[in-house]
Image (cartoon, grey):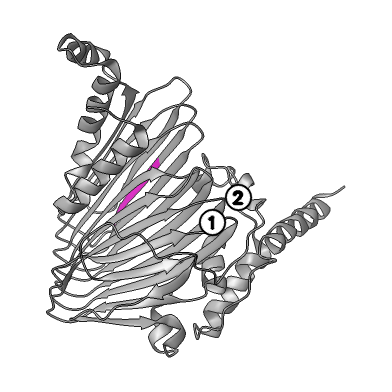
Amino acid sequence: MNFQQLDEMEIATNVSKISQFVTNFRENNLLIGDRLRDSSKLVLAQNDFPTTRHESWKYTRLTKLSQLSLTTTEKINSPVSVPLKSPHVISIVNGNIVDVPSIPGVNVFRLSECSEKQLELVGKHISIENDVFQALNTLYLKDGLIIEIQENQQINDAIQLIFETQESSIFCPIRIIIVGKKSSKAHFFQHFSGKGTGLTLPVFEYFLEQNAHLKVDKIQMENDESFHIATDQVHQERDSYFKINTITLSGKLVRNNLNILVDGENCETNLNGSFLLHDGQLVDNHTIVDHLKPNCNSNELYKGVLNGKSIGVFNGKVFVRPDAQKINAFQSNANVLLSEDASMNSKPELEIYADDVKCSHGSTTGQMDEEAIFYLRTRGISDKSARALMTQAFIGDVLNQIDSEEVRSYIESKLIEIHGWTI
């Protein structure tokens, strides 16, 4: 058998896997344009699910995901549970947009009701080449939203985006486009929960105009059989501010792709993340911050706590382009392994093509400080409580990046509930 025959066999196998996976899905009728639709079809025709042979998926196996038989549904069993007091609640159940409130200072449009001109924002800064998940989202999402914060408007209450899966074996793609107009300010709270085996496939695209400020708190709290592959694509213009805090509390496999294009001077970008894993869970955080213009700051802080046979991945890349002088860019990734079977794969990277910059990155992975545990136990604290206190202190640096006290309190209460901490 020659190499050509092997290549033909591999292509046939790839096409078979993808075609089998999408058997129960129906292509949407959104006016996204023939070019984007055709590109998505081509990607699915020519590519398989990525394997560990792909550098960006080296530590994340998708075999079980590719073997799932999923479907979509219009079914909604019950109203969603809303964590915060803010009245601005947009609920998405089983991939279906249920409630879209009227929010003063904010324009909200369903993608299914948008013109082709409005939908030019879809995928504007996303590279779909060879990315089967972007192609799946583009072709098979049922609907999505464009949320536009009006110019000079400050939205004081958080805009809650509540995503809930109420059925098993459900495919939930969703697309949310958030536009911060000039000198606008808003806070988004994203909450993911659900039950049963399935794939949640959200794509968020953020466009920050001059002097726009956006803060995002993302809580991922699905079940131990769920798959979650998310993309956050951000484009920042001059003087803008963007912060996202990603807190992963549960899920069988969670992959977060954060891609930031800093395309203006005097921008600030903050990416923070934390996860606490138990046996059989995997969380993979991939970040790219691409500095295209000078005089900007970016900071990344990611911390993980891993128990049992869990796996963590952090791959953070910072690019500083030739014209991007006077950049301050910092990455920090720290992890604690609570068992000998847990593993963490950390790879912070810098690619610097300018000479007047301050950039650094660091990564540490180790065990719990047993001397500190012993000290706490001598003060009458049980071993379990001592370890809970140490864990809380370790991830506290990340939780303290969350500006909303209500959000921090909610996360802390869920950590106590999920991990059975008694302090």
Which residue appears at 54% of the width and 56% of the height? 199
Asked which secondary structure carries label 1, the reply is strand
| Kind of residue indicated by mark 1 | Leu
The residue where tag 2 is placed is 65
> Residue 232, relative to residue 286: is it above or below?
below
Across the whole image, how many numbered discs are drawn on residues?
2
> Residue 61, relative to residue 345: is it above or below?
below
Depth check: give the residue in front, 95 or 342: 95
Please say whether residue 214 is one of the residues in the magenta stretch: no
| Kind of residue indicated by mark 2 | Leu
Q: Do we see residue 126 in this rendering?
A: no
The magenta segment is 314-320
| Residue 199, numbered circle | 1
Q: Are marks 1 and 2 in contact (CB under 8 Å)?
A: yes
Provide residue 183's location: percent of width, then percent of height: 13, 75
Residue 419 placement, left or right of 22: left
Depth check: give the residue in front, 61 or 292: 61
> Residue 403, relative to residue 44: is it above or below?
above
- Residue that sits furthest to the right in the current view: 1
Residue 166 placement, left or right of 103: right
Q: Quadrant of residue 78?
A: bottom left
Mark found first going from the N terminus, 1 or 2: 2
Which residue appears at 49% of the width and 61% of the height? 201
| Residue 158, numbered circle | none
Q: Main secondary structure of the magenta part?
A: strand
